[in-house]
Image: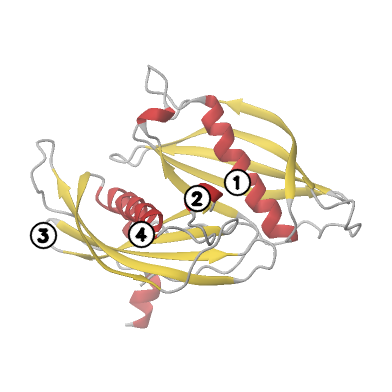
Amino acid sequence: MVIQPSPDSAIRLCDLVFPQQTNHQGSLFGGTAMAHMDKVAFLVAARHARRPFVTASSDKIEFRAPARLGHLLELTGQVRMVGHHSLSVRVQLDAEDMLTGERHRCTQGEFVMVAADRKENPEALPPVPRTRLPELDPSNGASRMVEIIFPGDTDHLGRLYGGGAMERMGKAAVIAAYRHARMNVTMAASDKISFEKPAHEGEMIDLHSEVIDVGRTSMRVGVQMDAENLMSGDRRTVARAEFVIVAVDENGKPSPAPGLVARQRNVAAS
């Protein structure tokens, strides 16, 4: 359904700008943008060293242009420099108009992350990775969302609620449908939701979504949720689902959806 990415400390994630995250002018709060960026910096640092980290400082955060209500946020983060017990992560935040596909850079910044266990673990951090974040093939709305499971997201056993997983998978499906169709969309149905393994508190969940089939006005979107233990690197698929999303016009009526794009690897295989 969705191809597994190769493990890498670099992070790319997508999210939407919702009304509660904006000011009276419909622009994303600067503090919310910084919170997203700090989360990415933590994930990059933890995946790089497989150790717990805390944010020591942020520097050179420049707000160039606003992200607005309904925009798609795409954040990327990569390790730039490594010291003995600290490292620097560069995070960039871009905004994308879901209907036109127009993108612009909103802000970028450097985050210094310090190993929280440096007193108990004197070993130096791994060097800067040679590999860089690969480009994501945007064909058929392919998108990724990365989040951390916090205590409020779990049951008494520390496992992610099924409803919370479904909410995140549904959002990922809508993002993929928007990016594919460049039209307003609405969810018509959820289908084939299977929970294969639990995701636990403190783990990273990585959602991969893309349009896998198109009818006249509807799109079937496949979503796969993986969980990763940030300390051990253990990674597994925890849930899969398919959603039916319908393209609609300005009056909310079903409208023809664009067909699938043939990817190069599929063409070569045929």
Work out whether residue 91 or residue 233 is closer to the camera in this orientation and state it. 233
Reading the chain from its start, which is encountered first: label 1 or label 2? Answer: 2
Calculate the distance from the C-alpha at mark 4 to the C-alpha at mark 1.
Answer: 24 Å
Q: Which residue is mark 1?
A: 40
Depth-wise, is mark 4 or mark 1 nearer the camera? Answer: 1
Using residue 21 as the reference point, say whether residue 40 is left or right of it.
Answer: right
Write the residue at 49% across / 38% down: 94
Give yes or no for contact between labels 3 and 2 (Cβ–Cβ under 8 Å): no
Name the secondary structure under disc 3.
Answer: loop
Question: Mark 2: which amino acid?
Answer: Leu
Which image quarter holds the N terminus?
A: bottom left
Residue 9: mark in rendering: none
- Percent of width and height locating residue 22: 42, 25
Calculate the distance from the C-alpha at mark 1 to the C-alpha at mark 2.
Answer: 8 Å
Question: Mark 1: which amino acid?
Answer: Val
Using residue 187 as the reference point, say whether residue 203 is left or right of it.
Answer: right
Reading the chain from its start, which is encountered first: label 4 or label 1? Answer: 1
Reading the chain from its start, which is encountered first: label 4 or label 2? Answer: 2
Reading the chain from its start, which is encountered first: label 1 or label 3? Answer: 1
Q: Which residue is mark 2?
A: 13
Give yes or no for contact between labels 1 and 3 (Cβ–Cβ under 8 Å): no
**Could one spot residue 36 in this view of the protein?**
yes
Q: How many residues crowd around disc 3 within 10 Å: few (fewer than 14), some, or many (20 or more)?
A: few
- Percent of width and height locating residue 66: 46, 26
Depth-wise, is mark 3 or mark 2 nearer the camera? Answer: 2
